[in-house]
Image (cartoon, grey):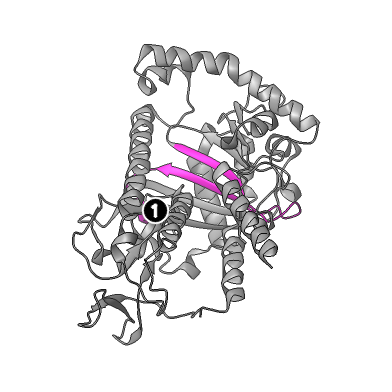
Amino acid sequence: GLYHRYWDFSKPYSDSWSVCPMHFRGATPEPYLIMFRPKLLQKMFAGFGAQPESNRAAFRAVILEALAERGNNEIFWGLPATDIREIKSEEEDVSRAELLAADGKSLGTFDLVVDTSGLHSPLRHHRVIDEAKKVYAGSVLVHGIIDSPEDVWPKELLQLFGRHGNLVGAGVKARIVVQRFGCGVEDNRTAVLLDIRMEGGDEAVFREIGIERPTSRKTGIITDAERMAKVKGWVHEFMGDHFDPLWHSVIDSMNRITIRSEYRHGPTELRDNVSLPLICIGDSLRNCGIGGGGNLALQDATDLASALAAPGVFDEVSGKLRSLETIRKVEPTMLERKKEFNDKKDKAYALFDTLSKNGNREFSFKDLPTVFPNFWTRLGVQFCFSFVRPILKAWYRLEASWGCAGSDSTSRVFGNVQAVLDAQKKGELSAKAAK
């Protein structure tokens, strides 16, 4: 199953974060904070299970392989659905759904359609009410790829990155995140994400750079020397003296770049009394912008899978859908989860915008009254940063010296995942005993 192959598409030891200042002080660059999952706490608490960085393309390939092994499904490529319509039957209580191509041609009729087509879903309006539709979230993302930092980075930066999954430079107007996404120990592929708060979106950025704004995914992947030089030049100019030279070297090492505005869906509600058998999950239900959407989508998929496996949903003889309402019960939970996540992002962005009024700079203790208006909360945060922060750094370095900092295939998984694996194992043992 998927969990048994988890480490085939994940990077060992990568579930730790090194949070750094925009400017390093002293001869040796030092992280401001290290966040990780200590081995002792992993053994004691299920909530500290392994959470490494994973490769989405490989993750998708594992799912497709699992489907192919079942032999009870077909996968079609290059058939984009642009609309859907309800097919009602006098003989059956539950309607069916017909998917349509751009030319109106039918792509087939189905008992249930699960829409996972994301932000640009052409079907979601049949299931939800979203008057704003796609809205600009106020950020532009410069997304770069580095084939292997270990081959091109200066020694000081490599020592800072180590085996961390994320290296973060936190400023109030722009934040840079370096994130591993390779599969296995030898795969060092790494993404660079420069998140810039600015008006005008990517149109303004391309205009300032002086290159034509791409009109497709293919042309949006910048690899040619001329455009790469112009984009890197603009990024260096934007970063200026606000970022340490080591951060500038990260930009120089990128092999390819894309630039895109962050869009997300507006306030979303479920439509009442929809008999069309369409379920939207992940970003199709509600996109919350860049970051976190993958985890939310997996939670949605888990909830939907549990609902589909409930007794009475499908007819045991014909296999047809019998109870759409049973499946519909998970939709409010999925939508509420996205609302809560979106509200947290709104508060964070509002805070960044407030702090950035004094220019592009890094955080300081002077910002604490703005970030934490409550005096006692602020006092607790100051205590953590003054005393807990050095303890965490020392703890991580101790585990690193033992060669066990971060998670690998021997590490504990989350409690709910372990429950699934245990149940499956118990079922296999019971089946063997019955034979």
Tally the numbered discs: 1
Quadrant the C terminus occupies:
bottom right
**Disc 1 designates what residue?**
261
Q: Residues in magenta? A: 174-203
- Dot 1: within a 10 Å radius of its alpha carbon, few (fewer than 14), some, or many (20 or more) residues? many
Task: Indicate whether 350 appears above or below 250.
Answer: above
Relative side of 396 to 167, left or right:
right
Can the viewer see residue 254? no
Q: Residue furthest right?
A: 402
Q: Position of residue 434 (x, y in %)?
A: 66, 65
As drawn, the residue found furthest toward the front would be 434
Q: Is residue 410 shown left or right of residue 62? A: right
Report x, y in % for residue 26: 68, 21
Which residue: 47% across, 14% down?
380
Q: Nearer the viewer, residue 44 or 101?
A: 44
Q: Residue at x 49, y 38 (%)?
A: 175
The amino acid type found where label 1 is placed reads Ser
Quadrant of residue 283 within the rendered picture: bottom left
Residue 104 locus on image (x, y percent): 28, 85
Q: Nearer the viewer, residue 432 or 213?
A: 432
Is residue 116 or residue 379 the one in the foreground?
116
**Residue at 23 percent of width and 69 percent of height:** 275
Helix, strand or loop at mark 1: strand
x and y, in percent, of residue 286 in the image: 33, 54
Left or right: 229 with respect to 4?
left
Q: Residue 188 colored magenta?
A: yes
Q: Is residue 281 above or below residue 315?
A: above
